[in-house]
Amino acid sequence: MTGLLTSWGDWLPRLLEGLLTSLQLTVVSLLIGVPLGLALALLSSARNRAVRWTAIGLVEIGRGTPALVMLQFVYYGLPSAGLSLTAFVSAIAALSLTTAGYTSEILRGGLQAVPAGETEAAGALGMSRRDTLRYVIVPQGVRIALPSLMGFAILIFQATSLTFTISVVELLSQAYSIGAATFRYLDVLVLAGLLYLAVTIPAGWLTNGTERRLSRHL
């Protein structure tokens, strides 16, 4: 046991570097993907048929394509079209597209859950459709969807483990590298799993707490 703890202490700095990369991928992908998802949620309800069906098509591509396939397409496929991206940028692009597809549906559900009376009240006050969306529907819809968005953020953090397939040096990649050098895959993967849990379990508690607090005010 002492030898295992000593090994874990030796491996921990590299794994923490990988964990930091995983967290960076998660945060940047959410910062890009969630606003894009909101835009797609709004456009999928647009009156213009071409705009509406284009948005719906993009949502279905984002949701229907597995994240692993999206990663392979961006990193290995786009260079054939003359667009080469680094592994880190490819990972962000792929995860952002996946995020946009899924969060679009989450946000659309939140927007549709806003009581019709709110829209009617805004109209009675003489607010334009754009102002009604901006000041009434979107803020309340995002608030309703927040717990689901937080839950999805945990899934995206877990999905960053797939980026080792395109040579991003994240947590799982570091674990595999250490395992290849020491032939102690089980030991290092257990430690990597504990680091994943150290993020996902508190994040899950935070999500549940946020959902309970918001449910008292909805």
Image: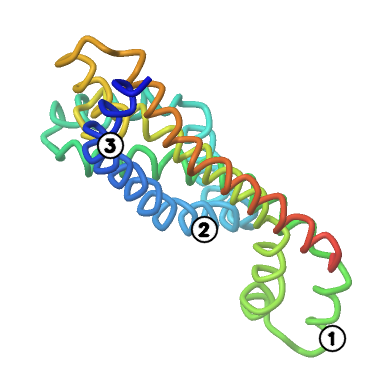
| Residue 118 falls in image quadrant | bottom right
Neighbourhood count class around disc 2 (C-alpha, 10 Å): few under 14, some 14–19, many 20 upward: some
- Report which residue position mark 1 lands on: 124
| Residue 122 falls in image quadrant | bottom right
Helix, strand or loop under label 2:
helix
Q: Which mark is residue 12?
A: 3
In the displayed structure, would residue 203 be above or below residue 170?
below
Of labels 3 and 2, the one closer to you:
3
**At x 31% / y 33%, what residue is drawn?**
171
- Report which residue position mark 2 lands on: 39
In the shown orientation, is residue 49 left or right of residue 69?
Answer: right
Neighbourhood count class around disc 1 (C-alpha, 10 Å): few under 14, some 14–19, many 20 upward: few
Q: CA distance from mark 3 to mark 2?
A: 40 Å
Locate residue 187, reporting x and y percent: 34, 18
Locate residue 47, reporting x and y percent: 64, 57
| CB contact under 8 Å: marks 3 and 1 | no
Inspect the image, locate mark 1, and give the three-letter code of the amino acid beneath it.
Ala
